[in-house]
Amino acid sequence: MVVFVAGIGIVNYAIVRSYGGRGIVVTGFFGGLASSTAVVGTMLDHVDQHPAAATYALAAILLADAAMAFRNLLIALVFTLQEGALLAALVPLVVIVVGTVAVATYTADWSASVEMDLESPFSLRNALGFGGVFLVIVVVGGVASARFGSAGLAVTSAVTGLVSSAGATTSAVLLYRAGDIGQQTAMVSILTATAASVLVKAALTATGPDRRLAGRVALWSVAVLAVAGLSAVVLLV
């Protein structure tokens, strides 16, 4: 799983390096698969230097959220095929992906070009670092689930999602594969981590120079998450 997640970052790093900032799709979505936090940082710097960039910064940040949710969706489905695909997580994650892409499509200036300075993913240190974080999450999540049930795992996923939603998603998938948690608990854990990642990016945007941009990012992020949460509730009921 560590290799799989690292592989996604490597492929998309190559895409961004090859095509540069040729459009919001490359900058936001493919850059987001490599590092969604880097996309937010890049866009905030760009808006600081060019205030007019706020017209398409919203689209880039939302596309980075879509990429993050899409990556979590891949992890949830690809590694649970043998045990029975984790379909419970499919609907809310698809809602986040489709919702953020729809808003980005409506607001984006597709001709815009933004250069990104991504850190190279070709690093054994980074891979081992992710593996270490992932191991801690699995242990803590397993203990929290055993002692406090699904609520304990959800809290662990929320806190972890602020740093690494991929790590939280991977740990939930492993616990599901081991039979320690069911589909619904895994879905809640994955969605909680994904939502935390979306919200922390909205919070990061609030530290930027454009308050209107921060407000729009927060508004659309909460709206998409609300719809995803509603779909999750429907599935749970």
Image: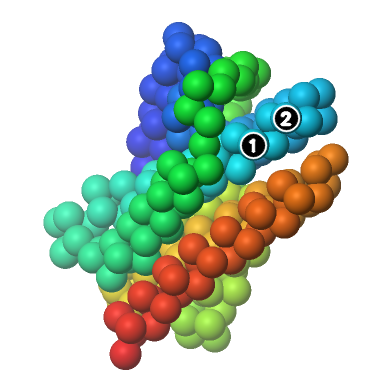
Task: Where is residue 237? Give x, y as percent.
Answer: 32, 90
Task: Where is residue 129? Give x, y as percent.
Answer: 59, 37
Side of 1 relative to 114 (left or right): left
Please tell me whether residue 90 is drawn above or below residue 214 in the rendered image: below
Q: Which of 32 and 10 lies nearest the eye of the viewer? A: 32
Q: Which of 77 and 143 lies nearest the eye of the viewer? A: 77
Q: Which of 153 and 195 lies nearest the eye of the viewer? A: 195
The answer to whether residue 84 is seen in the rendering is yes
Q: Quadrant of residue 174?
A: bottom left
Side of 205 relative to 66 (left or right): right
Which of the labelled discs sits on residue 55, or is there none? 1
Numbered disc 2: secondary structure: helix
The residue under label 2 is 52
Please tell me whether residue 222 is drawn above or below residue 49 in the rendered image: below
- Do callouts 1 and 2 mark residues in contact (Cβ within 8 Å)? yes
Q: Residues within 10 Å of mark 2 (few under 14, many from 20)?
A: few
Query: Please, what is the three-letter code of the amino acid marked with disc 2?
Result: Ala
Query: Please, what is the three-letter code of the amino acid marked with disc 1?
Result: Thr
Mark 1 and mark 2: Cα distance apart in space = 6 Å
Side of 85 relative to 112 (left or right): left
Q: Quadrant of residue 125?
A: top right
Residue pictured at 53% horizontal, 53% vertical: 165
Residue pictured at 56% horizontal, 79% vertical: 152
Task: Where is residue 118? Give x, y as percent.
Answer: 61, 21
Task: Where is residue 138? Give x, y as percent.
Answer: 49, 60
Numbered disc 1: secondary structure: helix
Please tell me whether residue 15 is drawn above or below residue 233 in the rendered image: above
Side of 207 relative to 163 (left or right): right
Residue pictured at 80% horizontal, 43% vertical: 210
Please tell me whether residue 19 is drawn above or below residue 214 in the rendered image: above
Residue pictured at 57% horizontal, 59% vertical: 220
Quadrant the N terminus occupies: top left
